[in-house]
Image (cartoon, grey):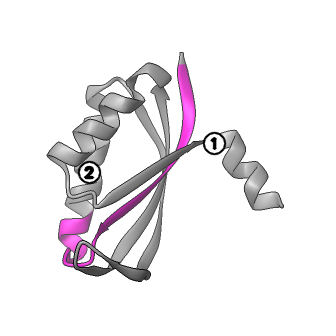
């Protein structure tokens, strides 16, 4: 059974617009390899970090709503670190995200 997740992805600040598009496409391909689907993508733009992380001062933030079997989430996270330009990622259940926005 596929579960709806909201994922926050941070991509390195060194990417240009075309490379960022390609990185987002790679994330989508990795998701589809695990039989998941991408429901929506929202680019939040480049934001500075509160403190440098791994010598990075900023990153491009992208929120993606995905459907994926819960048992495949760990495999998806592992694939992200190996096969894409994702600097960081975090996932929450979409229902929890909607409640947090209302508060």
Rate crowding at label 2 as few (under 14), some (14 to 19) or many (20 or more) other CA atoms within 10 Å: few
Residue that extends furthest to the right in the rendered view of this protein: 103
Residue 54: x and y, percent?
24, 72
Q: Is residue 34 above or below residue 64?
A: above
Q: Range of the magenta residues?
A: 2-20
Q: Magenta stretch: residue 53 in it? A: no
Q: Quadrant of residue 59?
A: bottom left
Q: Is residue 94 above or below residue 69?
A: below
Element under label 2? helix
Tell me the residue that label 1 is attached to.
94
Q: Magenta stretch: residue 14 in it? A: yes
Q: Say which of marks 2 and 1 sits in front.
A: 1
Task: Say which quadrant the N terminus sits in.
Answer: top right
Element under label 1? helix
Tell me the residue that label 2 is attached to.
25
Residue 4: x and y, percent?
57, 34
Q: Earlier in the sequence, mark 2 or mark 1?
A: 2
The residue lying at 49 percent from left, 24 percent from top is 70
Q: Quadrant of residue 57?
A: bottom left
Task: Say which quadrant the C terminus sits in.
Answer: bottom right
Residue 53: x and y, percent?
31, 73
The residue lying at 31 percent from left, 43 percent from top is 28
Q: Is residue 57 above or below residue 63?
A: below
60 left or right, relative to 26: right
Rate crowding at label 1 as few (under 14), some (14 to 19) or many (20 or more) other CA atoms within 10 Å: some
**Residues at circles 2 and 1 in contact by the CB criterion of under 8 Å:** no
71 left or right, relative to 1: left
Q: Is residue 62 above or below residue 82?
A: below
15 left or right, relative to 73: left
The label on residue 59 is: none
């Amino acid at each position: 059974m596929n579960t709806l997740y909201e994922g926050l992805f941070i991509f390195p600040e060194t990417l240009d617009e075309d490379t960022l598009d390609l990185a987002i496409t790679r994330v989508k391909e990795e998701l589809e390899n695990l039989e998941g689907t991408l429901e929506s993508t929202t680019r939040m733009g480049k934001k500075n970090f509160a403190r440098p992380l791994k010598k990075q001062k900023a990153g491009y933030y992208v929120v993606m709503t995905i459907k994926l079997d819960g048992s495949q989430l760990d495999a998806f996270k592992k694939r992200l670190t190996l096969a894409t330009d994702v600097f960081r990622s975090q996932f929450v259940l979409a229902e929890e995200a909607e409640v947090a926005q209302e508060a």
